[in-house]
Amino acid sequence: MKMTKEEKYRYIEQARPDELEKLQKQIERCAWRQNYHIQPQTGLLNDPNGFSYYNGIYHLFYQWFPFGPEHGMKYWFHTVSKDLCTWENVGIGIKPGDSYDSHGVYSGSAIVKDEKLYLMYTGNTRDENWVRHPFQCMAYMNESGVIQKLTNPVISTVPNGYTDHFRDPKVWKKDDTYFCIIGAQRKNKTGCAVLYKSSDLMNWEFQGELETTLPSNFGYMWECPDYFELEEHGILLFSPQGLEAEGEKYQNIYQSGYLVGEPLDLETRKFCHDAFHELDRGFDFYAQHTTLSEDGRRLLIGWMGLPDLAYPTDQNGWAHCLTIPRQLEIREGKLIQQPISELMKLRKNERQARFTLENERKKVKEFSGLSYELIYEIENIQARYIGIEFRAKDQEKTVFFYDSIKKELVLDRSLSGKSLEAENGNIRRCSFSASKLKIQLFVDVSSVEIFINDGEEVFTSRIFPSPHSKEVCFFTENGSATFQAVQWSYE
Ligand code: FRU
């Protein structure tokens, strides 16, 4: 049952007696709770926020609505990790409720300054006519982990020429100057990102729009922009809303993608870049957010979900999770995402298999489970279709295969279990040409993340199979191929 506006915009202190305890009990009974992904204790999780390394530990916050699977009053929920593998819930990081964030602490980012971790976020407010007014706000965490909000927003107005869809500051430092980009919508209802500059994180000067070479109507709003430099390239990530589907591209309700270019000119704001590419080819990926690891790697985490869609766990009182952390690099002008090597710590109980298949299906008995990592390499590709069925039993299965004639990768979740909204479709494809394939799957109770040839493409998706669907089968059709496979349990 959908909540009313009044129910959605309650603060946590306004919970009805036992409301959260009851919700927690209901959620404990849900068969789709994840084993190793970050998920909300109750309610809805969306964007990752404030990912950072501070005071000897990783901090990661996320957008959280406590009372159910709805986009209502948002909090920043705080988690920490020493190793990026296991995360500990700290609790609420930033609470809404001041005049500048009365209707939600929206997305933002973190930066260390003077031994403190500064958290810059969008304060969402609604006036008596339910018109949105965004403020860019600041909080900071001290070394004892106490988080305090500043009394006033650091950016109180939306610059001329933009609507109230103005949010998600991502902050960084270059030499002695701080910069931040903010996702924006022009008055003519097209999306862009704008740049601000500051010498102290408190006083921000509007610089203007990032000048990309994309068409001026590239979506109606850009959410969650993120700019950084990697191997001497400038990289802009953002989540544009409103791109029309185009062949295999832009199949999800909203998109997430990247531009690789020369480093952004911070004076002229000119950004010379190549074409826009989607970061992910699966069904459920949005609002990605990056940081630098302690040893200087650029790490990305995304929301494994999308706005404005119903998910099967809604009926159990919760929704969504975050992706595993991925390490970014550039290979031949392309942004590559690889699972971070820290995850190897989770590997247990290794099993291996090697076989050649010719127009047949082979169930590998040793390879079963709900939560695992599985890598298979395919050589001597003579077949047209070469693939895997996993989280399978009887009629249920999730299928991923390579079509060597059409030269495409295909993820099919039409038989994955409980289905999602029909208009979202059941198949995602991606053109891909290779004579050898290495497929790495991270499967959890209700998700899969598939990395192809060490991160050249990624398919991220929720799936909602029965707990009995644990089997793994490999197959070829119209010819033969050799498989070398290994699986580790993550349970
Ligand atoms: C993206 C987003 C952000 C916003 C947040 C609110 O999913 O809409 O633009 O800050 O979620 O939860």
Image (cartoon, rainbow, N blue to C red):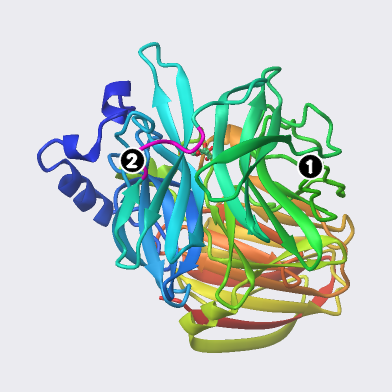
Magenta stretch: dominant secondary structure: loop
In the depicted structure, whether residue 99 falls above or below residue 369 = above
Residue depicted at x 40% and y 16%: 130
Q: Position of residue 226 (x, y in %)?
A: 64, 50
Q: Quadrant of residue 74?
A: top left
Q: Residues within 10 Å of mark 2 (few under 14, many from 20)?
A: some
Amino acid type assigned to the residue bearing label 1 in the image: Arg
Foreground residue among 300 and 282: 300
Q: Quadrant of residue 160?
A: top right
Q: Position of residue 171 (x, y in %)?
A: 58, 51
Res. 175 visible in picture: yes
Dot placed on the residue nearer the N-terminal end, 2 or 1: 1
Foreground residue among 70 and 188: 188
Q: Residue furthest left?
A: 17
Label 1 residue SS: loop
Q: Which residues are magenta?
A: 150-155
Task: Give the labeled residue for mark 1.
Answer: 269
Residue depicted at x 32% and y 50%: 148
Task: Give the labeled residue for mark 2.
Answer: 315
Left or right: where does residue 307 sit relative to residue 477?
left
